[in-house]
Image (tube, rainbow, N blue to C red):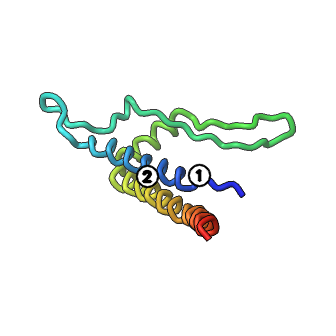
Amino acid sequence: MSLGIAKFTQFQKAQRDTAEAKEWLAHIGARGRGNDTLQLSHAHCSMKLTIAGQYTEGGKNYWESPACLNSALLSVIIRKRDELLAEAVELLKSRETSALIDAKSEIDAINAAIEAAAA
């Protein structure tokens, strides 16, 4: 029987992801040099959406969103940033919690192996 700690490693990555996101988000609204206040920049952000699927045999497999939609969606995201970013952090935290719960089965298996070896 081979035991590892892959699920705990996944938890640690999820934990780092949450911390990294929170650290990045802490800069929004912070004071920069001079009188600058750090904000999301529509001009420097980028995004696109992609629909995957084929309408017809031999047709395109991917359909990228038009620039006008990307720009409008980015404007909505920036306007609703507090709500959306808080929800994104909650999603990251939820993934972290799920990964830790999933790691319990590995820890239980490792503990069982230790107890069997000690018996």
* Helix, strand or loop under label 2: helix
Mark nearer the viewer, 1 or 2: 1
Question: Is 74 on the left or on the right of 63, as rendered?
Answer: left
Indicate the position of residue 53 as horizontal and vertical percent values. 74, 44
Q: Residue at x 41, y 50 (%)?
A: 18
Observer able to see residue 105: no
Quarter of the figure with residue 28:
top left
Q: Amino acid at mark 1?
A: Ala
Q: Is residue 38 visible?
A: yes
Q: Residue at x 63, y 64 (%)?
A: 117
Residue located beneath label 2 in the image: 15
- Circle 1 residues within 10 Å: few <14, some 14–19, many ≥20: few
Residue 56 location, quadrant:
top right
- Amino acid on which the number 2 mark rests in the picture: Gln
Name the foreground residue: 47 vs 88.
Answer: 88
- Compared across the picture, whether 72 is left or right of 79 comes to right
Residue 102: give x, y in percent of width and height.
57, 63
Q: Is residue 81 above or below residue 30?
A: below
Identity of the residue drawn at 20% across and 37% down = 37
Q: Which residue is mark 1?
A: 6
Q: Between marks 1 and 2, how big is the CA–CA gap?
A: 14 Å
Q: Residue 77 in the image: state x and y as whole percent.
A: 41, 46
Quadrant location, the C terminus: bottom right
Q: Nearer the viewer, residue 15 or 92?
A: 15
| Number of residues whose C-alpha sits closer than 10 Å to that of mark 2, classed few (under 14), some (14–19) or many (20 or more) | some
Does label 1 or label 2 sit earlier along the sequence? 1
Q: Which image quadrant is residue 60 in?
A: top right
Quarter in which the N terminus is drawn: bottom right
- Identify the element where label 1 is drawn: helix
Residue 58 shows which numbered tag? none
- Residue depicted at x 33% and y 41%: 24
